Image (cartoon, rainbow, N blue to C red):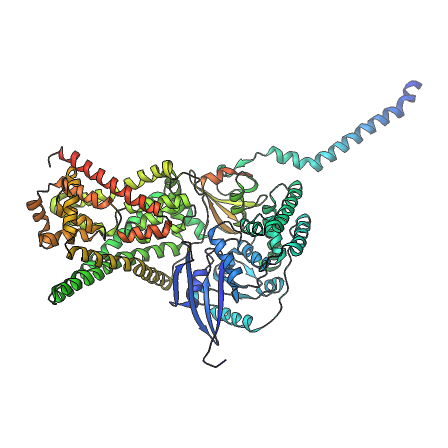
Amino acid sequence: MSNILLGLPYYLFSIALTYLLLLVIMIIYFYYGCVFIMEDTPTIPLINVPSGNKVQIINIDAGWGLQRRLADMGLTPGLRVTVVGNHKPGSVVLNVRGSRLALGRGISNKIMVQI
Amino acid sequence: MSKKEKKLITIALTGNPNSGKTTLFNKITGANQHIGNWPGVTVEKKEGFRVYKGYELKVVDLPGTYSLTAHSIDEIIAKNFLIDEKPDVVVNIVDASNLERNLYLSLQLLEMGFKPIIALNMMDVAYSKGYHIEAERLSSLLGIPVVLLVASRNQGIDELLESIACIVDSKIRIKILNISYGNEIDDEITKLEVAITTNAPLQKYPSRWLALKLLEEDAGIKKKFEELKSDGDEILKAKDRSLARLAKIHRNTTGIAIAEARYGFISGLLKDVLKRPSVEKESISDQIDKRVLNGWLGIPLFAVILFGLFEIIFNLSLPLLDWINKGFEYLSNLASNITPNWLGSLITDGIIGGVGTVISFVPVISLLYLGLAILEYSGYLTRAAFVMDRLMHRIGLHGRSVVPLTLGFGCSVPAIMAARTIENPNDRLVTIMVTPLISCGARLPIYVLLAGAFFSAYQGLVIFSMYFLGVLLTILLAWFFRRKLVKGESGHFVMELPAYRIPTINSVLLYTWLHTKAFLRRAGTIIFIVVLLFWLLDYSGVIEPIGRAIAPIFNPAGFGQWQAASSLIFGVMAKEVVIGAFGTMFAVGKAELGETITAQLGWTPQVALAFMAMCLLYIPCVATIVTIKRETNSWKWTGFVVGYTLILAWIIAVLIYQIGSLFII
């Protein structure tokens, strides 16, 4: 009997430590969790996004000149845009900062987005 | 300064494409404008004049641009004009319904040290979108005047002119705007700025702006420093070091980061100045576009619209043409009695014939331009180019090639000039090279006459087959040229879709008038001179021997007679003259020409068909040749077009005759 009583503080201490550890892990998970969650959402080419969806531009897989051209017209990485129309197999029309940009299929394939 | 003297002020109009810049330019200058070219390039330059109070305003309409870096020729022209010509006033037209992107250019003007007047145009559209803009606040935040306009309704023009007058009169020092591009970039800008000011300052440009441009890797500015040899080299090396440092920090290239910073600034600005509804409802334009851009509907819809356009043009122009021809015939008859003989002939066939030929182009050309103006101002043309891009791309052309190829059905000259809108030089060159293959309006009289004489029952079908042949060969050759000859990257397709608008009658008519006038001035003078030249050759009896000499070449095609060969020579001047020349040689009118040709030359329907194809394809008329040279700036390619059309025409004519002769009609 006295053996158990002697071990009780250690027992309680280890339980508390475990819970503390779990709490820390939970905090870390929720804090950085959004990163994990976002990385789960696939990055798809713009051409595959149906009409009416809002997407975020992740990356533009194109040469420097084309990137500049798109940036000059308002399309920059990180921007949230709306796909106003996806006219497969043709063009994609975006609402970029209020104006309508029509992109050919070639370019739409190079713009990687996340819904 | 006497009261009569007016002070001359130069005003530059800048702005995004589709911001209403042209409309505003037209409202300010009216018909007092001149369309030409920027020197050395084929970009349209528009200048106009207006008198306001004590000033004479020279207004220069700079090409519409989204930015002022050295990436496209439009931007280079705009930037160079602003820096080299130092206009007294810069007016920046901003589409109020599209503020965020339009201000990107405004910021670049401010970065350059200019104090533009912001002309907030299309306030009506902004209003209907539910936008509320605090113009005064915008003005005070940016430190420049802001004027509200609805240019298409003539509202705000006076206020703008007043603002221009005020700026010129006053000597107010307006505060300089400083935008932050992020701490790291700002640091690098300052470092470079100091280096430039100390070692290699450039006369006309603020050092800070130069530093910014270097970090954006602006090719034009880089070249300026390269020209400075060792001093410039130092700066360029410093730039490379700066970029290397920044590359470690930013994921994107520095140029993109700077663009983002500008938009960030604009966002912040707009939070203060613009109120917009939380949900933007689908506009009418979007709804229309759903149908127009539809993958399956879009192209047939365009075909229908094109067909409708042609129907109207041909139906309206043929009676007009008839009328004009009768008029000139009457004049010819009057003049033919003038002695001495050579003078009478010169006046009748040379001068009246020349003027008559030129004027005969006017109905088709002006109607074409009219149709084009409506399509362009309504906003549909952009969509058409977009919808057709898929098809065009397969052939090796560009979506915007649609415009030249369409105009080619009327006349190749404006068609080739219209190819300027195609940015990519490879796409543009191939488009220009195949445009002459499209059956232009001048060839129609040839078909009408010959088809009528030899295929009476099927004449409609035969005429259509000529048009079809032209289109077919255009497609085949475009594909061939693009793959084998003019290799190189083809343009990407990204375009802004402006909102659909109902074109105003004034702007459409003005466009038609100005462009027709420009055509008459350029092509008209060439045609007239060539007609005189041909008259001289003919009168001195040179043409017939030449015709006899080359006639045998056409034997395999069935028309190896000197009359045919000679009239083809005349056709180089202007295709429709072929029929007239034929008639003159036999001394018969057009009505009897068909029978005369059958009787005297022994033509069969196959020969007639081969001859029609020859007329369709062989060498473009002189006006077209000259236009090609102007637009391509290359004798090599112009010569190539002349050469390939001759060869192609001969081959096809021979094929038609030989294969056609196997069948008895």
Q: Residue at x 38, y 61 (%)?
A: B35
Left or right of B375 on screen, residue B268: right
Task: Give the image quarter of residue B389.
Answer: top left
The image shows residue A78 at horizontal and vertical percentages of 59, 43
Q: Residue at x 39, y 56 (%)?
A: B377
Q: Residue furthest left?
A: B599
The image shows residue A53 at horizontal and vertical percentages of 52, 42
- Quadrant placement of the C terminus of chain B: top left
Q: Is residue B354 above or below residue B390?
A: below
Q: Is residue B382 above or below residue B321?
A: above
Q: Residue furthest right?
A: A2
Q: Is residue B405 above or below residue B539?
A: above
Camera-nearest residue between B510 and B478: B478
Can see residue B359?
Answer: yes
Left or right of B53 on screen, residue B32: left
The image shows residue B645 at horizontal and vertical percentages of 27, 43
The image shows residue B552 at horizontal and vertical percentages of 15, 41
Can see residue B129?
Answer: no
Camera-nearest residue between B282 and B230: B230
Count all numbered tags in the image, as a single digit: 0
Left or right of B627 on screen, residue A50: right
